[in-house]
């Protein structure tokens, strides 16, 4: 017993953090970070910092305790150097271990993404954190706000996660590691990240999706396109599909998708790849204007119309990605899995060439699980 | 060697890293059988003692001394990997050699009162390790893409001439277990069987640790990571769970198990040195082995980085275990020692 106690004591004493021991009140936590580039070629890093502290005094002589936050902006030759300058400004140790969201400014995303090496090299930057692209500068996003919350980082995080404030399918989750540790290295897949913008009133908003081509921003997709992207990714599918019913003149329908099962594969016709997408969608009818569903044929007509509309939108998305030369959905990897020794799937350049010429074949099967209260 | 095998297997094999892991497991198993079966012939005797019977008194002592030195240098690999596992994450300003010395002291204290005493930690450590695996791999499945492993049997991916490949093959030092534990086991025959099964279970864990980074990051992404495992666990984020960042817990669990492995090596080195110099005191030898394991980490930066010196040490260990024990077997048979009565083998 004494030996065990001695052993435990030795181990506990030796595990107190050594020279790196730093109590929580001596730390300033970076919750959100924005990275821009100045016209002079310097990196401009904007960070939102939280620290444990005291604010004023409540009645009865007790001190009220509330987290305090501030936004710091600093420049440097590299992002890390800019952050170092921020550290110099603070009386506390800058701690990035709780960095929730990194926002990359447009110019950095277009031309300098490979220079963000520090983000993925530093042990204290959590790769499970999220990454987003700003449509203009990242600083305005980090300075933005959300109603009822003094901490935009939390807004961005909660609205992003499923079960948060919104389940909008247009919000695509972009993880740091997915972009910097996987997609930037696989030759047959490209990276993507959601677009986060600050409106004129400072309100933060998700605005579609940024897609990349070989570590360069290739283009920005709109919110409906981002929703279809999420659908194909199998991530989120709760969205509304609307269509005219061609078999019933003047009829329109809309359906809220509950679940969508997606199958994607790439086959070959000669040297031309064929991107095949099969969707099995189930949803609840939300609107039916200009007709009633008295018979099965009516239901089939509505389902077919909605299926065709969704197929058209999905095909349009893939075509857009082909035009941008970006393959964030990983069709190249699918092509390689199916035919690992094919020349076109042997390298990024060979695939990109084949990808542009690829035929897109989308088939959607729509099943209406409920028509709502009405027929 | 949960912290080293994934790195070198991915370096050497890329998409086919899983085949390198299997090669490592098979090599370890063969070593285990060779060493274990020989140790079974000399129940209750330590390696220096039966090496002396097989080779003669002085050659046995020389061999045992060299083995002890080899163990000390190999332990530096384990400590270096453990330091790398912690440095930059838990310790940023603390110098690597300080962490190494603390780890060595921890390992020394774990085995200071003997191996049997230290072995009482094993159920706790195994439970911790098992829980970590249970919490991580099923959760990582969401991010895994088995397609990254296709084509499955592409041997062209493996660079068998690279140092990484041979380090991977030599990483599983299962042969250490019969050498260390056999004299303390009541039923040696059963021990070999149990060790074999333990090795198999351990290899399942190692296998998962090798293929997971490949399936999550892709072969190219895994290769670009300095330490693909346990880095891949950093992908996990468990909100509303006591451990939001599983990577931190996993690193601690693996670290503690590494300390235990190092403790076993220190004890073995100490025992060997005690037998070589005819002393009944194991502790001085343990201290010498510990010092031998820490000095390279203080003097050589590459030892901490886990490359260079560390790779050479593992390969040296592989060469030693694949030559010494087969040679001992050869001499054992040539000298006709297998025909001696069992009582003579226990003397």
Image: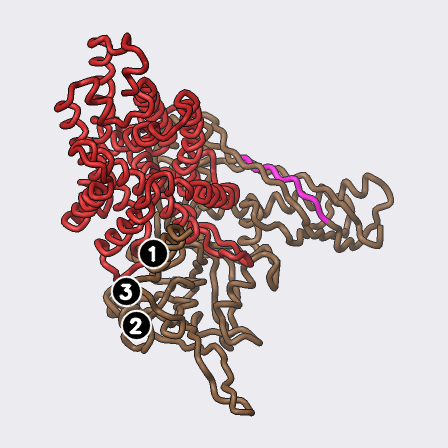
Chain colours: A brown, B red
Residue A133 is drawn in which quadrant? bottom left
Q: Is residue A148 left or right of residue B181?
A: right
Q: Which residue lies at the image location 48% right of the left edge and 48% below the top edge? A: A320
Q: Which residue is mark 3?
A: A19
Relative height, residue B107 to residue B183 (above, below): below
**Could you confirm whether marks 2 and 3 are on the same chain?**
yes
Q: Which residue is mark 2?
A: A87
Circle 1 SS class: helix
Which of pointers 1 and 3 indicates the residue nearer the eye? Answer: 1
Which chain's residue wears label 3? A
Q: Which residues are magenta?
A: A276-283
Which chain's residue wears label 1? A
Res. A10 mark? 1
Q: Which residue lies at the image location 27% right of the left edge and 51% below the top edge? A: B105
Mark pair 1, 3: CA separation: 17 Å
Q: Which residue lies at the image location 33% right of the left edge and 75% below the top edge? A: A92
Asked if marks 2 and 3 touch (Cβ < 8 Å), the reply is: no
Label 3 crowd bin: few (<14), some (14–19), many (20+), radius 10 Å? few
Mark pair 2, 3: CA separation: 18 Å
- Single out the residue that lies furthest toward the right: A294
At which x and y percent is residue A126?
Answer: 40, 57
């Amino acid at each position: 017993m004494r030996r065990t106690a001695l052993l435990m004591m030795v181990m506990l004493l030796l595990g107190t953090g050594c020279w790196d021991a730093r109590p929580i009140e001596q730390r300033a936590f970076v919750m959100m970070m924005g990275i821009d580039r100045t016209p002079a070629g310097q990196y401009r890093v904007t960070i939102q910092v939280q620290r444990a502290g005291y604010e004023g005094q409540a009645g009865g002589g007790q001190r009220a305790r509330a987290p305090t936050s501030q936004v710091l902006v600093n420049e440097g030759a590299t992002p890390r150097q800019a952050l170092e300058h921020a550290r110099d400004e603070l009386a506390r140790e800058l701690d990035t271990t709780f960095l929730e969201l990194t926002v990359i400014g447009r110019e950095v995303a277009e031309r300098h993404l490979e220079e963000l090496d520090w983000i993925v090299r530093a042990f204290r930057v959590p790769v499970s954190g999220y990454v987003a692209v700003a449509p203009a500068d990242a600083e305005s996003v980090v300075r933005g706000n959300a109603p009822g919350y003094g901490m935009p980082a939390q807004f961005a995080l909660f609205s992003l996660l499923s079960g948060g404030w919104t389940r909008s399918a247009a919000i695509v989750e972009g993880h740091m590691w997915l972009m910097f540790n996987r997609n930037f290295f696989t030759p047959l897949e490209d990276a993507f990240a959601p677009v986060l913008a600050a409106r004129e009133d400072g309100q933060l908003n998700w605005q579609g999706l940024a897609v990349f081509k070989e570590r360069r921003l290739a283009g920005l997709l709109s919110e409906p396109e981002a929703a279809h992207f999420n659908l194909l990714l199998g991530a989120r599918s709760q969205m509304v599909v609307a269509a005219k019913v061609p078999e019933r003149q003047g009829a329109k329908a809309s359906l809220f998708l509950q679940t969508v099962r997606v199958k994607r594969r790439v086959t070959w016709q000669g040297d031309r790849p064929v991107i095949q997408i099969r969707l099995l969608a189930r949803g609840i009818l939300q609107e039916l204007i200009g007709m009633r569903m008295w018979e099965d044929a009516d239901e089939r007509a509505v389902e077919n119309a909605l299926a065709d509309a969704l197929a058209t939108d999905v095909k349009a998305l893939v075509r857009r990605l082909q035009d941008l030369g970006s393959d964030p959905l990983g069709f190249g990897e699918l092509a390689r899995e199916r035919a690992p020794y094919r020349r076109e799937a042997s390298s990024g350049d060979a695939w990109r060439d084949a990808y542009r010429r690829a035929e897109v074949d989308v088939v959607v099967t729509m099943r209406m699980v409920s028509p709502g209260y009405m027929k | 060697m949960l912290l080293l095998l994934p790195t070198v297997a991915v370096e050497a094999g890329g998409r086919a890293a899983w085949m390198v892991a299997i090669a490592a497991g098979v090599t370890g198993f063969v070593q285990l059988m060779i060493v274990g079966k020989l140790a079974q012939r000399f129940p209750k005797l330590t390696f220096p003692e039966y090496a002396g019977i097989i080779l003669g008194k002085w050659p046995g002592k020389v061999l045992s001394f060299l083995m002890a030195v080899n163990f000390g240098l190999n332990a530096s690999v384990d400590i270096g990997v453990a330091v790398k596992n912690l440095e930059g994450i838990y310790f940023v300003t603390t110098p690597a050699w300080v962490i190494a010395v603390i780890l060595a002291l921890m390992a020394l204290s774990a085995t200071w009162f003997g191996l049997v005493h230290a072995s009482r930690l094993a159920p706790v450590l195994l439970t911790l390790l098992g829980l970590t695996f249970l919490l991580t791999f099923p959760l990582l499945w969401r991010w895994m893409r088995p397609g990254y492993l296709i084509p499955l049997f592409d041997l062209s991916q493996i660079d068998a001439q690279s140092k990484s490949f041979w380090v991977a093959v030599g990483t599983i030092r299962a042969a250490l277990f019969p050498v260390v534990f056999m004299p303390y086991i009541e039923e040696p025959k059963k021990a070999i069987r149990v060790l074999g099964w333990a090795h198999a279970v351990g290899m399942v864990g190692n296998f998962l640790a090798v293929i997971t980074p490949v399936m999550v990051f892709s072969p190219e992404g895994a290769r670009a990571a300095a330490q693909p495992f346990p880095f891949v666990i950093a992908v996990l984020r468990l909100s509303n769970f006591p451990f939001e960042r599983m990577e931190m817990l996993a690193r601690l669990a693996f670290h503690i198990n590494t300390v235990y492995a190092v403790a076993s090596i220190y004890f073995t080195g100490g025992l060997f040195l005690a037998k070589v110099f005819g002393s009944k005191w194991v502790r001085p030898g343990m201290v010498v082995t510990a010092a031998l394991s820490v000095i390279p980490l203080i003097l050589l930066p590459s030892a901490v980085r886990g490359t260079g010196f560390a790779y050479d040490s593992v390969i040296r260990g592989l060469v030693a275990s694949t030559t010494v024990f087969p040679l001992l077997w050869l001499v054992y048979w040539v000298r006709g020692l297998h025909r001696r009565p069992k009582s003579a083998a226990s003397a």
